[in-house]
Amino acid sequence: MSGHSKWKNIQHRKGAQDARRGKVFTKIGKEISVAVKASGTDPEANPRLRAALMKARASNMPRDNIDRAIKRGIGGAGDIVYSEKTYEGYATGGVAVVVECLTDNPTRTVSDVRHALTRFGGNLGTDGSVSWMFKKKGLLIISRKNVPDYDALLEIAMEHDAEDVKEEAEVYEITCPVESFSSLKDAIDAKKIPTEVAELTRIPENYIEMSSRQSESLNKMVDLLEDNDDVQNVYHNASFPDQ
């Protein structure tokens, strides 16, 4: 089906995160705590928690770290309160950027986000300035080598309300509504098909093509943002030259 390759962006992000695994555990721990505080400890009834636990397992996060994060969410370990903040703006070339944060100091965090954007030719926008360009979706990415029967995969996807199944050179990218994410993941797991990525994300409706120089600047900006402990996710609508 149609769509833009998400795997390329994720590969870059994963490569950068592997170089700072300790920070990744901190970010996932925050996400688990906030998800538990918002909707409880049952992953089956809490899609956000389930997605965070999937991410934790995929990152080989130690079980003790996960347990501590859950306890923080229910008020059993520490009294740090994280607030959810989403900042919007533009990067070089007019690319839209959405930065999701969990922070105990919003004043510090917004200053850091503004600095990262302006340092690389962008600017911080107002609430709602670009978020309307993105839709919240469930995303599953599966290696083609792990799918012996594409038609069977497509049937599972359609039975569980998938909106798109895109064939890439190395992977299949499946997008679905947030509310269908857990059931679709369960169905794929039941067929013993491993996933490279299973997460809740924001997908842009349109993309802006970038030059090689612009792409380099954007990637440096994203790396700077993701190196910040308060930043959970960075989304943009850039299309890189090799895509």
Image: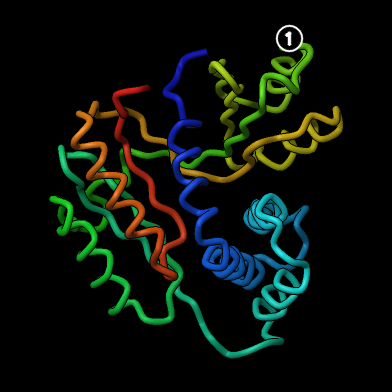
Say whether residue 178 is left or right of residue 119: right
Say whether residue 167 is left or right of residue 235: right
Q: Which residue is mark 1?
A: 151
Give the residue furthest to the bottom: 79
Q: Residue at x 69, y 23 (%)?
A: 157
Q: Is residue 165 above or below residue 238?
A: above
Spot occupied by residue 20 in the image (x, y as percentages of width and height): 51, 61
Label 1 sits on what residue type?
A: Asp
Q: Is residue 118 above or below residue 22?
A: above
Color theme of the render: rainbow
**Image-quadrant location for residue 109:** bottom left
Local SS, label 1 = helix
**Image-quadrant location for residue 211:** top left
Q: Is residue 51 above or below residue 148?
A: below
Spot occupied by residue 214 in the image (x, y as percentages of width and height): 19, 37
Q: Residue at x 20, y 65 (%)?
A: 115
